[in-house]
Image: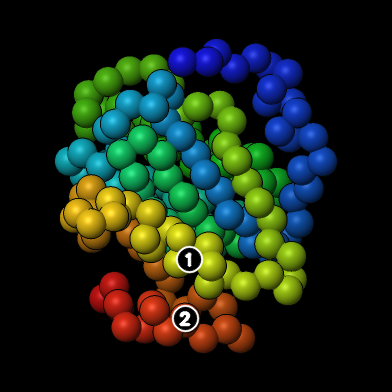
Amino acid sequence: MKEHRSSDYQALRKGRVSLENARYFITGCNKNRERILTKDLIPKYIFKSLQQCDASVELIALVVMLDHIHLVIRLKSGSLTTAIQSFKSRSAIAINKVIPRSGPLWQPVSFDHKFRADDDLAPILSYMWNNPEVPGQHFRCRKEEWLWFKSMVTLDVEYPEWLRKNPMG
């Protein structure tokens, strides 16, 4: 496995701008890509940790995979870096108690994309919805354990047709 250097992380953060009310698509991988994130109640702890960041972010969508997560958030206040670090810290503490394990849970770097005002969320949400499925096979884990979608994506955008046909409760 490639070892990341400090300069790699700095390069990823170069040009990162935290804008209030901006929406971001974020991918975070766990350390060493251990395939543990869908075990036991871990997805619920990930979701709960994101809810605890409620003052700074609004969760729009979340998918928990075996070794990484995808989420779409709206940054309400503060910096994106601080919000992600807070989430990673809270979730690592909770999950390390449950498994049990010790040490860092997440890779220090996360990959993010800020949506432009005219970007459509539907392609990203569709990708997230279908990401855990192995073509021609079953989903890698039960949907209720890895997927959460806010009841309304935005006030001005209707649910995509594919999501209305496959409601998540």
Which residue is depicted at the point 17% across and 41% down? 40
Q: Give the x, y percent position of residue 144.
A: 23, 60
The quadrant of the rendering that contains the C terminus is bottom left
Residue count near mark 1 (Cα–Cα under 10 Å), binned few <14, some 14–19, many ≥20: many
Tell me the amino acid under the disc marked 2. Answer: Pro
Write the residue at 23% across / 57% down: 136
In the image, residue 78 above or below residue 35: below
Label ID, residue 160: 2
**Residue that label 1 marks:** 125
Q: Left or right: where does residue 52 sit relative to residue 76?
A: left
Residue at the extreme right: 15
**Along the viewing direction, whichever of 102 and 33 lies nearer the viewer:** 33
Point out residue 5 in the picture as x, y percentages from the top left corner. Answer: 65, 14
Looking at the image, residue 27 sits to the left or right of residue 22; the answer is left
Q: Secondary structure at mark 2?
A: loop
Amino acid at pointer 1: Leu
